[in-house]
Image (tube, helix red, strand yellow):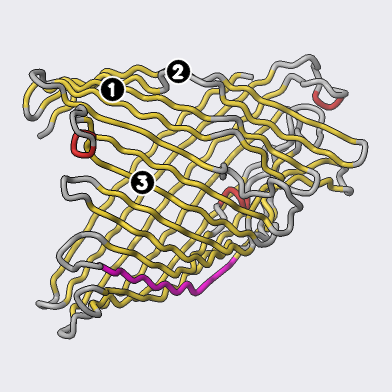
Amino acid sequence: TQSNSRFAMARLNGQWALRLSADDRLELRFGAGRSHYDYRMDQTGAAQDCLVARGLLCNGFETQNFVDNSSNLTGKWTRALDNGHQIVSGLEFEQVRRNEEGNAAVQDEGGNLQARTRRWALYTQDEFKINPQWSAYGGLRYETLLTEGTVDGVLKRNDSAVWTPLMHAVFKPDPQKRDQVRMSLTRSYKTPTLYQLVARYVPSLGENSWTQADRTGNPDLKPELATGVDIAFERYLEQGGMLSANVFRRNISNLIRSTTSFNATTGRYVSSPTNVGNAITEGVELEAKFRLDQSVAGAWPVDLRANASFFHSKVQDVLGPNNRLDQQPDMTANLGGDYRMRGLPLTLGGNVNWNPAYDTRRTDQQWAYQGAKRVVDVYGLWRLSPSAGLRLTVSNLTPLNYVTGSSFVSGTQYESATTTARNWQSVQLRLELRI
């Protein structure tokens, strides 16, 4: 396969703030944008004709071209009350219009679409201080989303709305220090994307099967709703630095996931986003930032940063094991550091990111595999002056191939596909100026 793409974008944003009185402030933000995308993918296979491929990859191509025009407007009014309360209310509006054209070797029509999405929201919240140790804020948000599009002459429309309350509290054991405990109870709302709702129908390049299915959108998608609880503790070290731990749990309804099904009418396998039911995710997130010589006597003055997260999730309507959320490994870890050399205007640093391999059971018959990810980045910064520096960065120092896979098992039928993509090392030399 060989692919080429080009993306161009222009945006204009503005902000206007007005103090209505000593206690009232009004802020307005507005913007407009336009983006243009061109894509072509060519596939060279063992079969000349995709319609008679008989299990072989075929010669074919796929093209996509779209133009997005967007606009947005937000307004926020803040009022400070004499009793320590601060009321924040606002309005948000956003609209995107898309014209898309596409083609593929295995279909005659272009698969064009015209679509738009319009979102607006109203919210209000009250921030207040209970006593020197406790502060809190609570609020309510109403959001609605309209998505409609014409795909090959057929109008598809989706309209959804939701109320989302939230409540946060902060406790400081010692009001004179920065240490604090944060607690949150929230209900969040994740709307389907324009692509998920009205994506045009794209036939597979090759023999149609479970692992090489056609792709399309789903205008009947419902938004995801998540009710979550977070408890976080932050400890600020006397010498500088910070330690934190966060525990969370989310109950998700109407989870959106791309699944493959067999269409008996057309006799083809089709992949599309679907609401697959309810899910639970929970985990622990740990983070530390400090200078090594302030914690270990005689050590180098290296600024260290590290974090590790441990996750567990379960899609309740899918049998286990490994019925986890998509793109959620059991854990992730990062370790980085910066060292400023003595006697030279040189700073050296680096970062290591690690995600282990994992399997995901997407449905009772379908599995997905994600290989391990390891990324090592290093840099050197030579300070030419207080306002100028020369930075050399090597990203992905030791590239690790990116491996993904999918499989289908039902009775005596078994089908699997594995993709290995080469990763690359990137070297960048950059002059940094501070004006």
Q: Nearer the viewer, residue 258 or 186?
A: 186
Which badge, 3 or 1, is on the more N-terminal residue?
3
355 versus 120 height, above or below? above
Residue 312 location (% of width, % of height): 58, 51
Q: Amino acid at mark 2?
A: Thr
Q: Amino acid at mark 3?
A: Glu
Callout 1 secondary element: strand
33 versus 388 height, above or below? below
State which quadrant residue 50 falls in: top right
State which quadrant residue 305 falls in: top left
The residue labelled by disc 3 is 287
Residue 77 location (% of width, % of height): 25, 73
The residue labelled by disc 1 is 379
Magenta-span inclusion, residue 270 = no
The residue carrying pointer 2 sits among few (fewer than 14), some (14 to 19) or many (20 or more) residues within 10 Å by Cα, namely some
Residue 54 location (% of width, % of height): 88, 23
